[in-house]
């Protein structure tokens, strides 16, 4: 069965997950949030009290993690860890920073690669992450690099946290985003970068609906 894959890469807080989920729903495709998969591994590492920077220790605890990616009746992705739904828990800021450190380890990326590719082999997908167009799905039908300024991404993240009832100061969020950018772009394995054939979409000056329309237009032109 031939499937269509759309790869959306970009830095933390660029709105990839929200936009990819909405676009997938409009297209009737399955949305695969790879960041949530890495966050679940990070959550497992945190609960195991393992230093996320210790590659050997992180690799050793991977086989003890029972990960499951499922979808509810509305098509929303859920992550389970050892039988527990951790979809909400993995969105905390401390899990984000841990995920950045954990995802830099080759053992982790290798461990999760097949799970991501299998999803694209069996369904039409919109998949977002840091290395989808460069490593996970290098032959994706559409590749988009979604970005925005660090300040705008921090403001969006602050608003999101306030809505969840877990507010954080703007300065703290901005520092964390800048740290995440450094970690993601400077890691030796699968660093965050724009694929040579990816379309650049900067949403700094766009609201959600404008960003969504721009994404759909790019996809329409490519498929």
Image (spheres, helix red, strand yellow):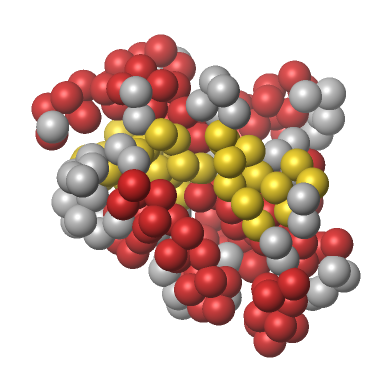
Judged left or right of residue 61, residue 204 is: left
Q: Residue at x 45, y 17 (%)?
A: 208
Image x and y of residue 71, in percent: 56, 34
Q: Residue at x 44, y 35 (%)?
A: 31
Residue that protrudes farthest toward the front in the picture: 1
Q: Nearer the viewer, residue 191 or 118?
A: 118
Q: Nearer the viewer, residue 8 or 182?
A: 8
- Position of residue 146 relative to residue 122, above or below, is above
Q: Residue at x 33, y 64 (%)?
A: 135
Residue that protrudes farthest toward the top in the picture: 209
Residue 211 figure quarter: top left
Image x and y of residue 57, in percent: 74, 83
Residue 53 figure quarter: bottom right
Judged left or right of residue 105, residue 113 is: left
Judged left or right of residue 181, residue 4 is: left
Q: Is residue 202 visible?
A: no
Image x and y of residue 146, in percent: 37, 38
Judged left or right of residue 166, residue 5 is: left
Q: Is residue 74 visible?
A: yes
């Amino acid at each position: 069965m031939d499937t269509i894959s759309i790869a959306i890469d970009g830095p933390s807080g660029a709105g990839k997950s929200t936009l990819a989920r909405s676009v997938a729903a409009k297209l009737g495709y399955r949305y695969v949030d790879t960041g949530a998969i890495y966050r679940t591994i990070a959550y497992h590492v945190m609960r195991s009290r393992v230093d996320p920077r210790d590659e050997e220790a992180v690799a050793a605890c991977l086989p003890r993690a029972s990960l499951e990616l499922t979808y509810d009746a509305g098509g929303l992705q859920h992550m389970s860890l050892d039988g527990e739904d951790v979809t909400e828990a993995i969105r905390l800021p401390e899990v984000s920073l841990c995920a950045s450190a954990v995802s830099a380890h080759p053992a982790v990326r290798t461990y999760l690669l097949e799970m991501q590719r299998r999803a694209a082999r069996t369904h039409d997908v919109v998949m977002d992450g840091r290395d989808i167009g460069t490593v996970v799905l290098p032959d994706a039908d559409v590749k988009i690099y979604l970005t925005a300024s660090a300040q705008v991404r921090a403001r969006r993240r602050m608003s999101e946290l306030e809505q969840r009832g877990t507010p954080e100061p703007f300065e703290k969020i901005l520092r964390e985003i800048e740290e995440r950018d450094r970690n993601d772009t400077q890691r030796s394995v699968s660093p965050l970068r724009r694929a040579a054939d990816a379309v650049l979409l900067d949403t700094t000056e766009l609201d959600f609906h404008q960003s969504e329309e721009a994404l759909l237009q790019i996809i329409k032109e490519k498929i």
